Image (spheres, rainbow, N blue to C red):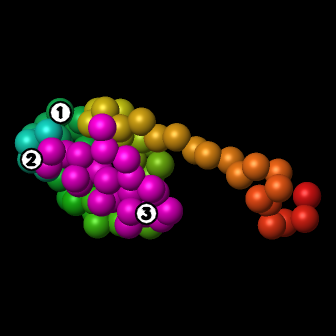
């Protein structure tokens, strides 16, 4: 299973695109499968910063991507709390 470090919309878009391509699914086929327009899929894959979170999460689910958030240990925090 591939691991992607997601730090911004662009890196999330790369993860989505690479996963879609590894599954040999075209943007058009993914659009038909999810009901999300091909234009929107393309924009998300290109790192559009204003993409709706619900659509992004739907694409992740439909492609089988599992997003995991890692919280820093208390010692690693830099905000003084």
Q: Horizontal and vertical percent for residue 16?
A: 29, 50
Q: CA distance from mark 1 to mark 3?
A: 23 Å
Q: Secondary structure at mark 1?
A: helix
- N-terminal label among 1 and 3: 3
Left or right: 41 in relation to 50: left
- Spatial separation of the CA atoms under disc 2 and disc 1: 10 Å
In the rendered structure, find residue 23 and report the number of the disc placed on it: none
On screen, 43 above or below 17?
below
Q: Secondary structure at mark 2?
A: loop
Instruction: Residue 25 in the image: state x and y as whole percent.
Output: 11, 42
Magenta-colored span: 1-22
Which residue is drawn at the image coordinates 42% and 41% (left, top)? 57
Residue that label 3 marks: 9
Nearest to N terminus: mark 2 or mark 1: 2
* Residue 10 position within the rendered picture, expressed as x and y whole percent measured from the top left: 38, 66
Q: Is residue 41 above or below residue 79?
A: above
State the CA–CA distance, disc 3 to disc 2.
20 Å
């Amino acid at each position: 299973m591939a691991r992607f470090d997601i730090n911004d919309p662009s890196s999330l878009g790369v993860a989505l695109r690479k996963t879609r391509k590894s599954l040999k699914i075209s943007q058009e086929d993914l659009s038909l499968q999810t009901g999300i327009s091909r234009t929107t899929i393309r924009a998300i894959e290109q790192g559009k910063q204003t993409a709706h979170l619900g659509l992004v999460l739907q694409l992740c689910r439909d492609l089988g991507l599992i997003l995991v958030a890692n919280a820093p240990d208390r010692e690693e925090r830099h905000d003084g709390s």
